[in-house]
Image (cartoon, rainbow, N blue to C red):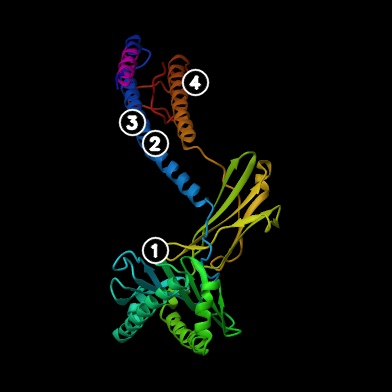
Amino acid sequence: MFSALALKLGLLCYGARLVALGTITAGDLVTFLIYQMQFTEAVEVLLRYYPNLAKAVGSSQKIFEFLEQEEVTPVGTMAPHDLRGHLRLEDVWFSYPEHPEPVLKFTFVGYVDGNPIVRYGSDTGRVVPRADWMAANLDQEYWNGQTQTGLGNQQNSRMSLDNVRGYYNQSRGVHTLQVMQGCDLLEDGSTRGYFQSAYDGKDYIALDLDTMTFTAADVAAQNTKRKWEKDGIEAERQKHYLENTCIEWLRRYVSYGQAVLERKEPPTVRVSATEAHGFLTLHCHAFGFYPRPIDVSWLKDGEVREQDTEWGGIVPNSDGTYYTRASIEARPEDRDRYRCRVDHASLPEPQLFASEPESNLLTILLALAAALLVASAVGAGVAVWRCRSGKKQKGYGVAPCAEGGSDGSNSSAPVLSA
């Protein structure tokens, strides 16, 4: 504050001296001071907003560092590779034997192409729509029927969880039982189904529709396998649901939500790089795309480097779109030889993306401010020199500088040169 005031007083005193000597007019001095104040205010505004800009740059860097972290998938997680069909996650029971009542009892969620459509929870005791197009196309009778199914599954799951805990000789602790069943309607018209179960996050038992038998993951699961295969009814019941009921309702759901399910949203792609210990790791991020299937690969000199590429999973975003990444290690000097190739249904053709150069916002802002200061100083010197030339050299073709005036070849306002 004091330095700025001192600068203004210094300029005013020096300008008054030049006016007294007749080098410039009082109008020249006033005009210069006005433009100097405008320039100073512009620089102050730039510097005032810089801290927020620096915070934004730092935050964005942290976001991409988080996205570039390696994903860890627990053993036993049974996420299907393709969610184009009807994925139904049901019979999820959490048991807390040391408490008189479980904290979280039971929930199931239904999906179509990765989009949640229905949910039931023991906290509400009702099935509710998770998609607007489901609520708009199905009457109350449907929701009442689904609620009764949810109540029945809740009771059966409680008994199943108690049985499984007994197979593992467990009486205390927190335990979970998960059952996932669903069906896919493929582009060629064929269908497929799956039924899988997990206990405490590990594979427990699954149905093989080709052999109509159940595959047990360990010795404890053999008890459930023998029980379900005793009369063959359980396998037939699941087969009928997966190949008939599930497919029938999947077709209906797709027709109800066709506008949402068949939309195409292109990915936003960002390529970044991190260097450590003499190695460069290139990361290709694809954000906000739909539908789920996407092909992200790395090319070196136009050749696909599939074996050297590490892919992340295709994970859902809260807005119904997806995100994925692909990374590859390279030598720093080979950075420009790599391209990320992205192919998606929303793109007319596969696109290539190069690594983005690192930028430093502080350097850019300081360079910009320095350039403005230099330009201002140079402009001031040139303008005053031209004014002096106009007064001393007759016939030069440049009119003498006057208060409020300008010459035809120089539209800049007269400024002061120290």
Q: CA distance from mark 2 to mark 3?
A: 14 Å
- Give how far across and how far down residue 368 sits, in percent: 46, 33
Query: Which range is magenta?
Result: 3-16
Left or right of 109, for residue 73:
right
Whether residue 4 is situated above or below residue 263 in the rendered picture: above
Q: Amino acid at mark 4?
A: Tyr
**Residue at image mark 2:** 50
Label 1: which secondary element = loop
Residue name at image x 29 percent, y 19 percent:
2
Q: Which mark is residue 174?
A: 1
Q: Which is in the foreground here, disc 3 or disc 1?
A: 1
State the quadrant of the C terminus.
top left
Bin the neighbour count of mark 4 within 10 Å (Cα to Cα): few under 14, some 14-19, many 20 and up: few
Whether residue 171 is situated above or below residue 193 in the rendered picture: above
Left or right of 141, for residue 341:
right
- In primary-sequence order, the first of circles 3 and 1 is 3
Q: Is residue 171 magenta?
A: no
Q: Amino acid at mark 2?
A: Tyr
Residue name at image x 65 percent, y 39 percent:
278
State the quadrant of the N terminus.
top left
Q: CA distance from mark 4 to mark 3?
A: 36 Å
